[in-house]
Image: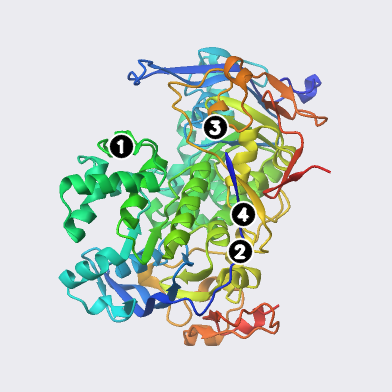
Amino acid sequence: MTETRIQSNDRPLIEVDGVTKTFHVAKSASGNSRLRALDGINLSVRRGETLGLVGESGCGKSTLARTLMMLERPDAGAVRFDGTDPFGLRGKELLEWRRRVQMVFQDPFASLNARMTAGEIIAEPWKAHRGLYKTSREREARVRELLHMVGLRPSDAKKSPQEFSGGQRQRIGIARALALNPDVIILDEPVSALDLSVQAQVLNLLNDLQQRLGVSYVFISHDLSVVRHVADRVAVMYLGRIIETGRTEDVFEHPRHPYTAALMSASPKLDVSGAERQRIILQGEIPSPLDPPSGCRFRTRCWKAQDVCAEQAPGSEPAGKDAGHLAECHFPLETLKVRSGELAPMP
Amino acid sequence: MSTVTAAETTTTDRSLPVVLKVEGLNVDLRTPRGTVRAVDNVGFEARAGQTLALLGESGCGKSMTAKAVAGLLDPIADVDGGEILLNGTDLARLSPKQRRKFAGPELGIVFQDALTALNPVYPVGAQLGEAFRIHHGLSAKEAKAKAVDLMRRVGIPEPEARVNAYPHQFSGGMRQRILIAMAVALNPKLLIADEPTTALDVTVQAQIMALLKSLREESDMAVVLITHDLAVVAEEADTVAVMYAGNVVETGRVADVFASPRHPYTKGLLESVPVNAERGAELNSIPGSPPELHKIPAGCVYQDRCPLVQEVCRAERPKLLPVVSKEPAAADGATPRAAACHFSEELDK
């Protein structure tokens, strides 16, 4: 998945190159105990952009996020952050790297300490990064500023998490991530636990913050309509591999991998016009990552599968003229155009 | 892979028999902060062969309404008035024993979380067969044969081999199929599905929704689908009742309600969906969050978040009244639309 060659001043903030991660787990029925959660992942995140990471449960997207956070060490492959391997950093350099990569979690109820006030939660990262704001007056002012940035009141600093609604708690989580002025924030299903009316508020906030601060997002979500709205580029994962990636509009409007097309077709649409639409309903469920199929991992559920798909894993092929649109498939969709869930022959 | 055509035009035919009619239903919750009303004067109808969606966000009372209909309320919740008419019989007036006997075969329910809804220490076949043993007096052997038939009916591969397996040996989607099989075992007239696909991945969700639809068409069941997902409502339901803070705020045919909402809450919800918005553009969001049950204001329940709020909204709770549309084509004469808003007319486009 080589990106179009970039000039050195335009080098991606994060580059992931062939990363593989295997976990050792209890033996499966077939006697396999090696779970390959990530299998040769390539991706990049540029400055100020949002990369959407989509896929169903067990596809490896959370393991990938944990690897980007250096919470998992890859077995093979390389992660480069601003050109350097964070796994090689020690001491002050490591601390500085940690400042630059922050995370917002899915569950705004479990991810905030109920025994701390909102202000203490937001200020906690500065206990590890002492140099950032030296006096308590500076810290208090910064907490007020951060609360204001995420749409809360300065007086909210004294409240405990239980006094906030789910959406407000997620704002606190975002303020905590911003406290260290990071370059990238990994957002792991940041709005999945929120009600729809509140979800839109938080998405607007994230968008607004990105425009003001130029921070990059890795936005993990199973909700395709949310990803389509926020992401500049998307990567679709299936059983530990990125099976398709490209600019959001290319991938959503011209998916080339059958799984991407099925995923988009399966997600319900808010269309009451009564227009007929063809739906692809996949048979079966994701195979166990302990016993992935040979060759192409999607072949057991794919309607285009041929013998070659079982024998040989497809390489990552450029999918048409659009730069950076890649799909891993022996028989990428060419004659189909999927637009807002409609499957129709391409003109 | 198979392709099915979804979203054929659905019309609500008033000649279809009403299977479930709920009227003036109140449910009170006893909490440490005192008694609160979780379901307030709720009414709706579900017709044979059609799907009614109860749509709302968490805490709006949609699941509580369903549990009241099914007679499965927690001990801290009480039905305080209202009628629950299942084929004309008021379930609320029956003794628990009468209710089990009458409603047991007539009403099936599917819960969100299939793993906790199934008993982990019994094989699925025994759990599937239980209804036949209790209501039809079948022997264990006969019931197991029925269980195998049911598993086949809901698309579980190799049912003979898997009837003795335990719930943990099935995937999430297969467990949900088993739960659906249990609910339809006795060919009920009414199926309540409480967020049946929320815990599932999207490709599996599509399978389960297709299954529910084919079962509904096969047996002409009425389905009450409880969900927070507007897109699921748009694709699966014929009629919708939108709930907010324990109240039904708008109801009607899905096509009408979604095309021209007549309650500001419905309108705000539809505009919050990031589907038509340009990428990265500001989404219309509803300010604030839903009120907690002990803080529901007098007057209109939506007043604190509503862009149209006026004095009258704080003074007087609007009734769920039929709305008249300027555009007669939009209104299906067969299914009256209703909204609980003092300014519903102003939303008429």
Residue under pointer 4: A269
- Check disc 4 and give the amino acid type: Lys
Pick the quarter of the image with the C terminus of chain A: top right
Q: Which residue is mark 2?
A: B270
Instruction: Tell me the CA gap for discs 3 and 4.
Output: 23 Å
Which chain letter matches label 2? Answer: B
Which mark lies nearer to you, 3 or 4?
Answer: 3
The disc label shown at residue B160, or none: 1
Q: What amino acid type is highlighted by mark number 1?
A: Glu
Q: Earlier in the sequence, mark 3 or mark 4?
A: 4
| Whole-number angstrom distance, CA of label 2 to CA of label 4 | 12 Å
Front residue (pair A337, A270): A337
Q: Secondary structure at mark 2?
A: helix
Residue A337, quarter of picture: top right
2 or 1: tag closer to the N-terminus: 1
Q: State yes or no: discs 3 and 4 in contact (Cβ < 8 Å).
A: no
Instruction: Judge depth for marks 3 and 2 and give the one in front.
Output: 3
Q: How many marks?
A: 4
In this rendering, the answer to whether A49 lies above or below B269 is above
C-alpha distance separating marks 2 and 1:
46 Å
Q: Position of residue A73 (x, y in %)?
A: 49, 17
Chain holding disc 4: A
- Mark 2 residue type: Leu
Which residue lies under the disc numbered 3?
Answer: A301
Residue A279 position, x and y percent, is 62, 47
